[in-house]
Each structure stands twice: as C-alpha cells, then as structure tokens.
Amino acid sequence: MRATHLRVGRAALSRTTLSREAYRALRSAILNRRLPAGARLVVRVLAEDMGLSPTPIKEALAALDREGLVVAVPHRGYRIPTITPHDIEELYALREIVEGLAASLAARRGDERLRAQLERLLTRQRVCVREGNVEGYGDLDLAFHRCLREASGNRRLSRVAEAFNGQIRLLISTSAQLPGRLPVSLREHEAIVRAVKNHDPAAAEAAMRRHVQQAGMALMAHLANTPR
C-alpha cells in the first residue's frame, strides 16, 4: 500500500503524522529491543517493512538521532548504538554526581508544586509497575529525573544531563526489564521524594546516589551474565 494512501479511519494521514507514527514505531522497537543494539537501519528497508515512503522514515530517524537513540553513519544510514561496560561506568559515575546534585538542590528549593509533580509521576510509575509496562516506566523514569533537574534551578546542570539522555534512556529500557528491578527502582524513587518533601538536601542526594548506583550495578551484572 502506498504511503500517500495510508489511512486511519477515514482520514488520510499527513506527512507529519506519518513521520510521527514512524518515529513512535521505531522508538518502541528500539527500546523494547526488537531492534537490537548494533543493528543497522536502512531507510529503504524500513520504508518497505512499514509500508511508507522514505521521507517519513528519514524524518523519524533524524528525530531519533537527536534523541540519541540512533547514530548517523556517513553514507551508510543509521545504527543503534552499542553501549559497553566501560560506557556504563563512565555514564553512571557522571550521572551519580549530576543527579545527586539536582536532588539536593531540588530539596532545598522545592515547593508544593514540585512535590505534587513528583507524586503524580510516582502514581503513574506505580501503574506501570503493576502492568509490567517497561517502556512507559522508562519514559516516566526520565521525566522524574528531568523534573528534579529543572527544580534545581541550575540550567547548566540540566544541559549536561540532557547531553547523555539518549544513552541513559537505552540503558533504562534494559535495566527496567531485569527481574525485580522495576519495583526496586520505584521504591528508590519514593525514598527520593520523601527526602525532597522533608526539605532534606543531604538525604535527597544520598537517596539519589544510591538509586543511580543500584541501577548501574544491575546493568553491569546483567552484561556480565549476557552471552556475547
């Protein structure tokens, strides 16, 4: 079926909508590991598989590249990045410092609005844990950390963290699938929120650092037990 005739209900999809749908489908496939790390993504092949023209596929891949979920390879299309144990060590060492500082500053500066935002995120995360919705939990995990960074009032800190968000999101999708990790991660988030509510910067930073450390350790253990 030609992409220009693809329909939902009775309305023909616009190019923008097609690009958005291609983005969502590819993003979900990457985060759920239906497209594995290291896989090469060829526009022509994807267009054929999805029944679309190349244009929305290219636009979707460009958006995923900006997000850090794919990497552009000159003259060869795109590939899904492979993250090594060394990458995890570096990323999580940096993340522990950045996210710990963000939690401390947020606890010091936070108000009722921040506490309400965090509670709403926790509520939605609990639903994802009950339903086993790994992709949804991963997106909410990122939103939880972004909320604290924005509440920190430190714009440079936020920019540093956003620079490696794509790789972190890929790793979250892996760690969230580890047996028992989802409810543990949720409890760690709850401890962070309690400290923020109590306006306790030291406790908030300590809870955040423990959370990041545990996530990194779970990932490293998973990689160590994964056949190469």
Image (cartoon, grey):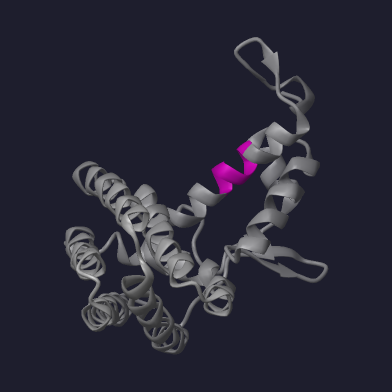
Q: What stretch of residues is rendered in magenta?
A: 21-26
* Residue 77 coordinates in the image, percent (x, y): 75, 62
Q: Nearer the viewer, residue 76 or 185?
A: 185
* Residue 188 part of the magenta-drawn span: no
Residue drawn at (45%, 69%) of the image: 149
Q: Nearer the viewer, residue 201 or 85?
A: 201
Q: Position of residue 146 (x, y in %)?
A: 45, 64
Residue at the spot 69% in from the left edge and 32% down from the top edge: 17
Confirm whether the magenta stretch covers residue 24.
Answer: yes
- Furthest-top residue in this view: 10
Question: Is residue 43 left or right of 170 when viewed as pictured?
Answer: right
Residue 99: percent from the left, percent from the top? 39, 77
**Total count of labels:** 0
Q: Position of residue 199 (x, y in %)?
A: 25, 71
Q: Quadrant of the C terminus?
A: bottom left
Q: Main secondary structure of the magenta part?
A: helix
Instruction: Evaluate whether residue 181 shows in this view.
Output: yes
> Residue at point 57% right, 48% down?
26
Q: Residue furthest right?
A: 75
Q: Is residue 74 above or below residue 123?
A: below
* Residue nearer the viewer, 77 or 178: 178
Q: Quadrant of the N terminus?
A: top right
* Foreground residue among 159 and 182: 159
User: With respect to residue 162, does 55 lie above or below?
Assistant: above
Name the side, left or right, on which 59 lies relative to 118: right
The image quarter containing residue 224 is bottom left
Q: Specify whether residue 52 is in view.
A: no
